[in-house]
Image (cartoon, rainbow, N blue to C red):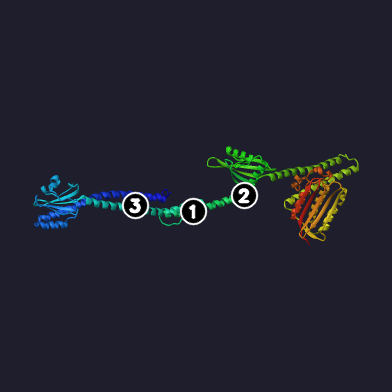
């Protein structure tokens, strides 16, 4: 509503204030003019009576005096000249209600009678016999008698009424002008304030570039200047906060660890993709838990409760979808209490796997070395203690010691090679190689072994007359390992097929067997050190060191190539690799 606005309130205040002042002023003016008209008429009548009295005191003839009196007096008044008690003269008047002077008035009004007795001017108001209120003024004549001037108060009252109407009309006009001026002034004063209100509304909607026009140089103009400065400062600080928030959000989102922030009530305030992935996987693993606004995984709820109650960091472990997670939850403090917590979740699956591989590596190396060392010790003691009496028995024991020493040397050399490869110290000796004869030679050296094992070994190629650049010793080491593994894991009457092809820049080799296959859960770890699949599926006398595939992968990686494996239990396994070559 208008009257509830600043313009309305200011206008109403000005209007009421001016109206109050005008009412008081009108009241006093009316009182003033009420007495003023009577006093003014009385003074005029006294002056007239004095002039006529002075004229009578001169020795002019009565007709002259009466003629002059008619000229001097007010037409609405009457003049009565008492030359003596028997000689009176009364003038005419255009006021029909104004009676002629009657000597009896002197008897009824002692105050009037004193003008003759005491020679003093008098002034009196009274009602005539026809109930007309008159004002009468008397002036004495030195030789006796008096001059009376009287006038009806109705005429004066008419003048007073006209004056009152004029005052009221002026007050009404003044109030109208004041209303217009108040609205105009209030609108002009509050117009910048209204614009500031609109600008403030725009600020609440994020439009920080909003400016208020500076129309004046007074306090309101200064307020507009400060408002615009405030808008600029807000824009600067909001942009700075937004940049910091985006930077923090970018940092949190790009973290490999999961991070999320919770309130005391368990509401998720901030969460990054790895933490959201953890939550999704937990709820997928626990479908009986219903997702709600504040519904959290059990481990998170327990950690939050412990952080709030004990006010210290909490470390929790969780297993979700076969992966291991470690969660560190620390409290977030307000001025005097914990207002929530921040949690960092790290996927420790790879670390745990590497730790297991380290332990397995130590166990495997210990096992692989313990067996030949025990055999060396046992057979050496047999020779020293002359347990083997014949020369043939001693030669047999010596042969076993020699073979075990070669096995130990091969294991140590492979370990050293693998360590150098994983440390990035492998040096390739690139050479130009005729690809097809190179592969045929490697496959041919396994023909005797394959016949002994009753395994059909086949080679298929379509790379005649092609020469490529590679490290032939290292690639031969890879092929030897793959073909040897394939033969060792293939039962009698099975097959091993080697397929080789190349294009302009890559060599592709595939070794496929019909052996026992590799369990699906072992495939992701098949290229790890000392990792062996189900040992019951390998011919007992043909078990390897468990380092061959790890070395093969490092050699292929050093050639900037890739190695793959596909397998099905009791169907067979296929190893394949591809490396870039520079054809000559």
Residue 449 visible (yes or no): no
The x, y position of residue 252, in whole percent, is 61, 48
- Mark 1 or mark 2, whichever is nearer to me: 1
Residue beneath disc 1: 231
Quadrant in which the C terminus is drawn: bottom right
Q: Which mark is residue 253?
A: 2
User: Helix or strand or loop: what does disc 1 sit on?
Assistant: helix
C-alpha distance separating marks 2 and 3: 70 Å
Determine the residue positioned at 86% across, 44% down. Answer: 398
Q: Relative to residue 311, is residue 435 drawn left or right?
A: right
Measured in 3D between alpha carbons, the distance from the residue under mark 1 to the one under mark 2, in whole angstroms, is 32 Å
Please state the horizontal and vertical placement of residue 293, each as a whole percent of the image. 60, 42
Q: Earlier in the sequence, mark 1 or mark 2?
A: 1
Of mark 2 and mark 3, the one earlier in the sequence is 3
Front-most of 527 and 391? 527
- Measured Cα–Cα span from mark 1 to mark 3: 42 Å
Q: Residue 478: x, y in percent?
A: 79, 52
Residue annotated with mark 3 = 175
Which of the two labelled residues, at mark 1 and mark 3, occupies the earlier sequence position?
Answer: 3
- Mark 1: give few (<14), some (14-19) or many (20+) Cα within 10 Å: many
Indicate the secondary structure of the residue bearing disc 3. Answer: helix
Task: State yes or no: discs 1 and 2 in contact (Cβ < 8 Å).
Answer: no
């Amino acid at each position: 509503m208008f009257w509830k606005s600043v313009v309305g309130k200011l206008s109403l205040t000005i209007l009421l204030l001016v109206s109050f002042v005008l009412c008081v002023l009108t009241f006093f003016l009316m009182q003033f003019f009420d007495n003023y008209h009577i006093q003014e008429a009385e003074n005029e009548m006294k002056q007239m009576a004095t002039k006529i009295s002075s004229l009578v005191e001169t020795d002019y003839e009565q007709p002259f005096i009466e003629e002059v009196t008619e000229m001097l007096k007010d037409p609405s008044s009457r003049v009565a000249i008492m030359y003596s008690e028997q000689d009176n003269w009364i003038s005419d008047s255009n006021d029909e209600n104004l009676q002629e002077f009657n000597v009896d008035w002197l008897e009824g009004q002692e105050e009037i009678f004193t003008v003759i007795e005491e020679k003093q001017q008098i002034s009196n108001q009274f009602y005539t016999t026809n109930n007309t209120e008159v004002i009468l003024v008397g002036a004495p004549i030195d030789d006796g008698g008096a001059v009376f001037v009287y006038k009806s108060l109705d005429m004066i009252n008419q003048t007073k009424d006209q004056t009152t109407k004029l005052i009221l009309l002026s007050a009404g006009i003044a109030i109208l002008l004041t209303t217009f001026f108040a609205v105009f002034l209030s609108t002009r004063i509050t117009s910048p304030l209204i614009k500031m209100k609109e600008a403030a509304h725009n600020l609440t909607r994020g439009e920080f570039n909003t400016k208020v026009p500076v129309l004046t140089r007074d306090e309101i103009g200064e307020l507009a200047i400060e408002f615009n400065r405030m808008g600029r400062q807000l824009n600067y600080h909001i942009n700075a906060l937004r940049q910091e928030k985006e930077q923090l959000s970018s940092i949190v989102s790009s973290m490999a660890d999961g991070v999320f922030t919770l309130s005391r009530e368990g509401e998720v305030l901030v969460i990054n993709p790895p933490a959201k992935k953890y939550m999704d996987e937990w709820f997928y693993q626990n479908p009986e838990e219903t997702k709600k606004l504040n519904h959290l995984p059990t481990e998170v709820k327990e950690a939050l409760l412990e952080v709030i109650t004990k006010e210290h960091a909490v470390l929790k472990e969780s297993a979700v979808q076969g992966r291991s997670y470690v969660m560190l939850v620390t409290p977030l403090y307000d001025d005097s209490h914990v207002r929530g917590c921040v949690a960092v979740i790290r996927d420790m699956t790879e670390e745990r796997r590497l730790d297991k591989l380290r332990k397995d590596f130590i166990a495997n190396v210990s096992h692989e070395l313990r067996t030949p060392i025990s055999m060396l010790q046992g057979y050496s003691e047999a020779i020293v203690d002359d347990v083997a009496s014949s020369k043939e028995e001693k030669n047999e024991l010596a042969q076993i010691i020699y073979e075990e020493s070669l096995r130990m040397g091969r294991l140590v050399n492979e370990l050293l090679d693998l360590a150098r490869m994983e440390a990035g110290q492998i040096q390739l000796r690139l050479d130009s190689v005729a690809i097809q004869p190179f592969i045929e030679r490697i496959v041919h050296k396994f023909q005797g072994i394959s016949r002994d094992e009753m395994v059909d070994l086949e080679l298929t190629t379509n790379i005649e007359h092609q020469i490529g650049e590679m490290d032939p010793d290292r690639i031969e080491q890879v092929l030897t390992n793959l073909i040897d593994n394939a033969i060792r894991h293939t039962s009698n009457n099975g097959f091993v097929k080697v397929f080789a092809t190349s294009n302009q820049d890559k060599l592709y080799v595939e070794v496929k067997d019909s052996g026992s296959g590799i369990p699906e859960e072992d495939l992701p770890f098949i290229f790890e050190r000392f990792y062996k699949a189900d040992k019951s599926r390998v011919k007992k006398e043909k078990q390897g060191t468990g380092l061959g595939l790890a070395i093969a992968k490092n050699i292929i990686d050093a050639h900037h190539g890739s190695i793959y494996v596909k397998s099905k239990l009791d169907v067979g396994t296929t190893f394949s690799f591809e490396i870039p070559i520079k054809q000559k």
